[in-house]
Image (tube, grey):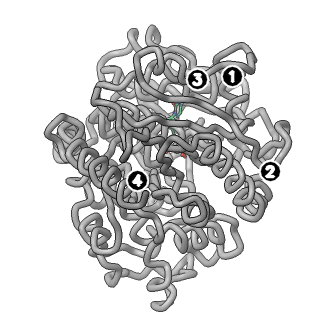
Amino acid sequence: MRNISMGERGRKVHGIMICVPYQGHLNPFVSLALKLASKGFAITFVHLEFLYRKLCDAHHANKTDVDLFSGARELGLDIRFTTMADCFPLEFDRDANFPEYWDTMVRDFPALADEFVGNIVSSEPDMLHFLVADTVYNWPAAVAHKYNLVNVSLWTQPALVYCLAYHWDLLEQNGHFPCKDDVPEEIKYVPGVESINTKDLMHYLKESQFASVANRLTRLIFEQAKMADFVLQNTVEELEPQTLAALHKYLPNYAIGPLNFSKNLPTNTVTTSLWSESDCTDWLGSKPPASVLYVSFGSFVHTNKQVLEELAYGLVLSGVNFIWVIRQGILGDGDTNALPSDSFQDAIQERGLILGWCDQIKVLSNPAVGGFLTHGGWNSTLESMWSGVPMICYPIGFDQPCNRKLVVDDWEIGVNLCEDYGSVDREQVAHKIKSFMNGGVSDKLKENASRLRQLVHNAVEIDGSSEINFDRFVKDLEAKIHAQN
Ligand code: UDP
């Protein structure tokens, strides 16, 4: 660990960190908090109260006075932990009411964040503060400006998605925002993106999503994201070199990923899983190497019963071993009965394991796992790459169509589940899974998966690009804080 980071006249440098309340954001945020603390910064990690309760429910028998970072502090890291209210009562179902939640968060949360950050700053006058906020918020630039804080923005999706959203106006000028859902066209004018088909653009750029809250929010956040002092990207320089190089022209931009695999951090001391995990090590231990397909659609997107049914029978017909994570609430309509019928359970017997949640990184790194049927969330993508596990991609929304393009078309470490976006048919599913798991994966795809596995592992070594970029960021951050105070 480095010496404590001190500003001029010996004032300690303190980061206030606030992420949006989703698993795919929380995991990299916590790693970043530990990374910054290991460089000697003092950190205050802020959870929204409801998320904190969810973590306590899942791991601490509903206790409500758990300091989630006490283990990290015992190891000498200066991390405090606190919570703040969002705009809703604790019992409000934010997941099932996504549009209402975010419409209100966009409108009312900035004032709460302003007051909350202002209180921290004024209660600790002996410290030099900076802000590390999720890019997916519309308030950090204004709050940072008001309290004279250096504004660090953490982006938890690929640089490709950042770059496309950054050039929203350009897409609009060229008639690609909103883009027609069923008219595929190649886009070649976005700096840093050699080519992308409109079918692979983020879901919220499509005409059918024009009225969606994701569309309104993303445009808004990118107007203020451009004002960040530093942008941290949870990606790897060697994975997206052209896109990152193009962004460097506009922003102080640092690729420091994959954050979930940063070296020498006490990540096991901090609770991050929003659901309690089932352990499937014994079950996996009973299966031959590379014989199990791991199936999960992450923590956030919803799907419908018909899709789940086609997948379920596709898995049955395929004959392969599988673990399928069906998290509570995946249907998004309050229906808790996501699985088709008892006959499905009878049909899978010992061959399939259905879980509500698991330690995904542990599962993917088990030698019994040979493939990942994924919605293509960015963390899941990086985690699969980390273990060299080839993917079958089934993008559902948000950034996932772009991530699919990277995985299947650019890096060639995965295949599509179905050729038509959104449609799922059990016979096709069975055929795809069967051939993928029974040797149908080409040697090239396997070679690519193992090459990229090495690439992401190298990035987090001491002389790897992400570590070098992180050290550069820390130096630049300190210089900026000192210059500003
Ligand atoms: N995850 C997990 N257990 C599960 C399913 C998912 O720990 O059973 C984690 C996974 O490791 C990843 C995160 O949840 O870090 C999901 O993030 P991602 O960006 O892949 O998808 P999102 O949930 O944001 O759609």
- The residue under the point 53% across, 52% down is 133
Disc 1 versus disc 3: distance between alpha carbons?
A: 9 Å
Residue situated in front as seen by the camera: 51 or 303? 51
Disc 4 versus disc 3: nearer the observer:
3
- The residue under the point 46% across, 27% down is 78
- The residue under the point 55% across, 29% down is 80
370 versus 89 height, above or below:
above
**Dots 2, 3 in contact, CB < 8 A:** no
**Amino acid residing under circle 2:** Cys
Q: In terms of image quadrants, where is residue 305?
A: top right
Label 3: few (<14), some (14–19) or many (≥20) C-alpha neighbours in 10 Å: many
Q: Which mark is residue 68?
A: 3
Label 2: few (<14), some (14–19) or many (≥20) C-alpha neighbours in 10 Å: some
**Dots 2, 4 in contact, CB < 8 A:** no
Task: Report the residue that reaches farthest toward the left.
Answer: 463
User: In the rendering, at what x and y percent does residue 210 appear?
Assistant: 66, 76
Name the residue that disc number 4 marks. 416
**Amino acid residing under circle 4:** Asn
> SS of the residue at dot 4?
strand
> SS of the residue at dot 2?
loop
User: In the rendering, at what x and y percent does residue 481 appear?
Assistant: 39, 54
Name the residue that disc number 2 marks. 87
**Residue 340 in sight:** yes
**Amino acid residing under circle 1:** Cys
